[in-house]
Each structure stands twice: as structure tokens, then as C-alpha cells.
Image: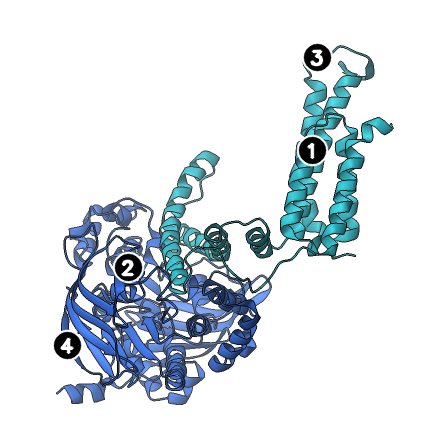
Amino acid sequence: MRNLLHDMNPSLKFVLVALSMFAIAFFFNPLTPFIFWIGILLLQVFMSKVNWKAWSLFMLPFALGAFGYLWTTIVFAADTNGDVVWSFLEFQVTAEQLETALSLAFRVMAFSTLSLMFAFTTDPVKFIMSLMQQLKLSPKLAYGVLVGYQFLPVMKDQFQQIQQAHRLRGAELEKNALRRLLGMRRILIPMLAGAVRNAERSAFAMEARGFTGEARSDYFEVIKLRKVDAAMTAVFLLLLIASCSAEYWF
Amino acid sequence: MHETIFSFRNVRFRFPDDEQLTLTDLSFDIHRGERVVISGPSGCGKSTLVYLLNRLYPFNCDGIISGSLQLFGKDAEEYAPGEINHRIATVFQDPDSQFCMPTVEEELAFTLENLHVPREMMKQKITEVLALTGLSALRHEVIQSLSGGMKQRVAAACALVMEPEVLLLDEPISHLDPVTAKEFILWLDRLQHELDLTIFAVEHRLDLWDSFFSREIQLDRSGSIIGDKLATAHFPVLLPERASTMVPETVLKVNGMAVKSHGKELLSGLSFTANRGEIMVVAGPNGSGKSSLLKALCGIYALDAGSIQAPGIGFVPQSPEYLFLEKTVGRELAFSGIASSAQLNDLMERLRLKEIENAHPFSVSHGQKRRVATGAMLADRRTVLLMDEPTSGQDAAALHELHRLISERADEGVTFLIVTHDMEFAESLADSVLLIKDGKMTGKYPAQDVWNHAELLAEHHLLPPKGAGRLAESFA
């Protein structure tokens, strides 16, 4: 049960996530994104092994953003006609305003939770392999991304080394954010130079092992669509339909 | 005579942007079962030659080729892309950029998928090649977590899983330390015997290969053949002996140094001193803390305990360009504004940087970059210089240049701490040797006491230098 979201076919999960986002975007009532958001949270609680501490950290900026939407929509609304449901200081909040605000805020929460659910339960390598097998992504692109993924830790290491070397030269870290950004080019140029070299080497190594970018006839690790995927699709669609039709129930 | 597999007739090659030929009038034949090495200085077109054989060139660089190049009796151009690659497999020099999948098994599978091997046969082929290469235990390991030597073996296994007839080696040991390189060569030797492979390698340092190769083709800087002969065992690069110019005046004093990172102890209890003009070689197995020591000494890592006393410590990383901040060599040296222009002038004169004063520091040669980095450190009055693996992957000319750079500076009173695995290089320069193992100091020894102490060297994953004395006799 706790593995269900992790075991899902990554391409299918991706399609479902994209489909849900697209569908929810057409509903402007606050209830639809709210129910969808709670639903995704429950799915995650019962069907995944998510590190909730890391999850909360990632969620924090989105939650702040959602609150920002809520606040600004209430305070700076253009249209202030209608029944006042709540008033404090000199602010008068109308029902319509509150509805728009909640709708926007819940939408941010729903979309970010959905995205994080995908990110936290999907292995990037499996995702690419699945995109190639189920959605016919071109191997040239797919393996390009995979090589890039292998290089990430190397690049991080290089970044640190160059930063340390610069500090040794007495190049102080700029306090001013804009200047710091401009100063980054001193680190990025040698990194890019190295990256270009590495990219060429990798490309050569792949080509020398017979990689031509054409479609493969057989995969070693076959990523299938299984019964779990059918069941999970049903769960997702049910949740989606329930939230989209929420308006008519209440 | 065995079947001819490669046949070169007046092959010339140049890159579209170059006027000069990279390879000039190459004519030779390679026969099945041969072990051929192409030797020559860096930049003589050795790697280009490898890329011509596995058909990466001329397509990938729009290179211009003339003459006749036949692979297995058929013109090279007649092969479709990827067609030749399972018969001629390649192991490249950089262990870090040859892989695209996370684990060993997946990487091998990638190769088999490229060749359209049916899925039912993949498992078996992978099992076989891992057994053959003795890597079965690594099957599910993450490649990036392996050592350089193991990565090169995995790269070779990926080549061998294609069941090739020829194995091309593009300086496969240049990023490995000598002991690991030796092990790799012995391992390769066994495989060649078992599989009856043809081996075609390019290499600039042949001393570690002993009698592995049967034939050596020498290229000069212009990419023409200057010799084609039976291969003989090579001696290491002969570097001039140096009389110590160490002055009995302590400049660096390290006392009870300890360094921790993320709760892990990297170094503990290091105490030693260094004199003015002393050249100290720091050596030990990979991961023993050599680089951590350098980083702690120059202040990149904070000390957990102990103290360092020194006037000013500079650091020249393995990639000297990491230090560069300015657009010209001249401004690079003047960056901190500590040295006066007269001092800078003098420094540039001594480091032979005058001729490249207005060049961009990224555009000069590797040896020049190192001189610029050294100059930048000296201009900041850092008179204790740390060098991280400056010998790795360097050819004879580069080693001579490095030797001269260090030797001249030491004569001027600069103190050096040099991390290297190259004991021949160490022997020609070092006054003392600091041996490190598992983050602890085995001891600091006068250089002379270490070279004949084979046991002590072996404990620290080092090979004794091939005696310079014996070499001098054989050349006399």
C-alpha cells in the first residue's frame, strides 16, 4: 500500500498529473482545488513513503505564495461590490472577493502538492526510461538528459572547488545581490568550459559504444503498465471527477 | 603473417579550421593479435588517430582526410555510423565521463541495447562479461561511487561486452595512480591472452606498461611517423637531479592538526615543520586525506584542533584555471594589489610570463596556466606553495617544465608541499616525504630514506622509483 505511488508507471503518473492540472485550471470555485488538494495529500499519506520533513521544506515557499495570493486578492481587489461578509480595520471583504482569493490560494496549494507528489515519488532515471518506452521519447534526447543527470554531482563538486579557489585569491563574496550575480560568471565560465569538454567526451564514449540515437529494438529494463497502474488511474480520475463536480453537490 | 585489420596508406588529416595537418602521411598496417602502441608528445594527434579508427572522426569534426584508410579490408567511409563500433571498441582516458547510466549493470545493458541484442540474451551476456573481467561483485554498484581504476575496468567491460575484435585504448591510465595503473595493465594483459584481442593504444607515458606492447609506432609533434619498431620496456622520464637549497629556517609549523567535515574525521594529529626552500612531497593512498591536508593548510577547511604557523600559504589546484579571476595574465597577477609593479615585473620575468602578459589566462597552455597561478600566489607573498597532483596526466615535456618551475622557485626560497603519486618525479625533487594514511600521518622522512623502503611505500600504495642511478649508468 505504501509503495503504490512509487510503483506507478512514471509516464502514466506524469500524464495523470498533467491532465489533472489542465482540468482543475478550468474551475474557478474554491471547492474544486480544495477537495483535490486534500485528496492528493491523503493519497500521499496512505500510498507513499515520503520524507515529510523534506516535503515541508519544499512546500514552505508554495504555502507562503498561496497566502500571498489570498492576502493580496482580499486587500487589493478591483471590484468591491457585493455583500460584505467580513470587515476589519478599514477593509471590507465581500463574498465574491473571498471566493476568488480562496480559489487562487487552494489552486496554488493543489498544484504545488501535486508537483511535489510527482517529484517525491518518481525516480528520474526510471521516468526517462519510461518516457522512452511508453511515450516514444527519442533516445537521443532521453540519454542526453540521463548523462546530464550523472554530471550533476560532478558539477556541484566543481562549483565548490572554484568557489574555494576564488575565496583563496581574496575575491570576497559580494554583499550586493546584483553584483554577486554578475560575479557568478567568473565561476560559471570555467565550469561551462569544463562542461563542454565533458559533454563531448561523453558523446564520444556513447557513440563509440554503438549509440546512434535510433530507436531501440529491445530494452533491458522493461517498464510496463501493470494492474496497479489501472487501479491508480481509477483512483486519480475518481478524485478528479469528485473535485470537479464538487460545486454541484454543495 | 596474420590477417591485416587496419591499413593506412598516406593518410593525412586536418581539422577544418587548421592550416596545419594534424596527421601527416601515415602508412602502416596492423595485424590481428598485435599489441600496438602509438607514442608521442601531447598534441601530436594520437587521439585523433583513435577517433579515425572508431569512426568518430571525420564526421564529428568535419575533418578533411586524404589517402586510404581501410578497416578489415574495407574503406572506412563505407561503414554506416555505429556499424564498426562493436568490432572496434574503445576505452577513453577520463574515467568520469564515459558513462550515462547509474549502475554497472545498466551501463552494460545500454551498450547491448545499442547493438540490438535481444532481451533474452542480455542478462546472460552481462553475467558472462562480468565473470570474465572479475567484476561480478560490482554488478549493482553505482558507477560514480567507484574508484578511478574500477571505473576504467567497467569502461573496458562495456567495450568487451560487445565482443570486439580490436580494443582501442586512448591513454587509459593517465588519470590513475601508478599502483592502480599497474593493476589495470596486468588485468588487461590477462584479458588479451584469453580473448586474443588486437590492442591498439595511444599513450605518452610508457614506463608503467613494461613489456605489455609488442610494437611501438612513434609520432612527432607534426603527426608524422618517426619510428615503427618492436616495443621495448621504457624508462620513466629522466628528470635532472637537484641539489637541495633548503635553508635551516622553519617557515611552516603544523601542530596537532585535525579536520572534521560533516562529523567525519578527515585528518587527525598531524604535526610537522617545513624549512625555507624545502620541497616536501605528500603521498599516500587515494582518500587518505592528502587533498584535505592542502585545503586545511591554506584555510579552505577550518581546523577542528591544532594550529598552523606560516607567513602565507598559497595553493595551486590540479586545474590552475580555477583560480583565475581576470581577463589578462598581467592583471591576474596584480589582482590583490599587494605587490608593487616593480615586483610584479620581476616576478613575470622570472616565471617567463612576459610574452603572455596580455593573453587571456584561459587561453594559454596548461603549463603556462600553472605558472600564472604560481605567479598569482607569489605576488600575494604566499611563500609556502601547495600543489595538488601537478604530475597527473603530464607528458615528458610538461614534467620537465613543472620540474623547472618548482626547482627555480625553491632556489628563490619558496617552500613547496606537493601531492603526487609519481615517485620518480618525487625522487628528482623532494627533500622530504610526508606519508599519510587514513587521515593520519605515518611520518615525515628525509627523501633518501624512503626510496629504498619498498615495504613502507607499498603500505601507502606507492611504487618505488625506478632508480635514477641505474638509469644514469645505462645511458652513459
Spatial separation of the CA atoms under disc 4 and disc 1: 73 Å
- Tag 3: Cα neighbours inside 10 Å, few (<14), some, or many (≥20)? few
Residue identifier under label 1: A23
Q: Mark 4 lies on which chain?
A: B
Q: Nearer the viewer, mark 4 or mark 3?
A: 4
Q: Where is residue B195 in the image (x, y as percent from the top left)?
A: 39, 83
Q: Is mark 2 on a helix, strand or loop?
A: loop
Residue matched to label 2: B57
Q: Where residue A79 is drawn, which disc sits there?
A: 3
Numbered label attached to residue B51? none
Chain that appears blue: B
Badge 3 vs badge 2, beta-carbon distance below 8 Å: no
Residue under the image location 47 percent in, 56 percent down: A147
Do marks 1 and 3 share a chain? yes
Q: As rendered, which of A179 and B300 lies closer to the eye?
A: A179
Q: Which callout, 2 or 4, points to the residue nearer the camera? A: 2
Looking at numbered disc 1 in the image, what kind of residue is underneath it?
Ala
Q: Are marks 3 and 2 on the same chain?
A: no
The chain holding disc 1 is A
Q: Distance of mark 1 from mark 3, alpha carbons?
A: 27 Å
**Quadrant location of residue A74?**
top right
Quick check: marks 1 and 3 in contact, CB under 8 Å? no
Position above or below: B375 against B126: above
Tell me which numbered mark, 1 or 3, is placed earlier along the sequence.
Answer: 1
In which quadrant of the rendered view does residue A86 lie? Answer: top right
* Residue B406 in sight in this render: no
- Coordinates of residue B299 in the picture (x, y in percent): 44, 58
CB-based contact (under 8 Å), mark 4 and mark 1: no
Q: Name the residue under label 4.
A: B227
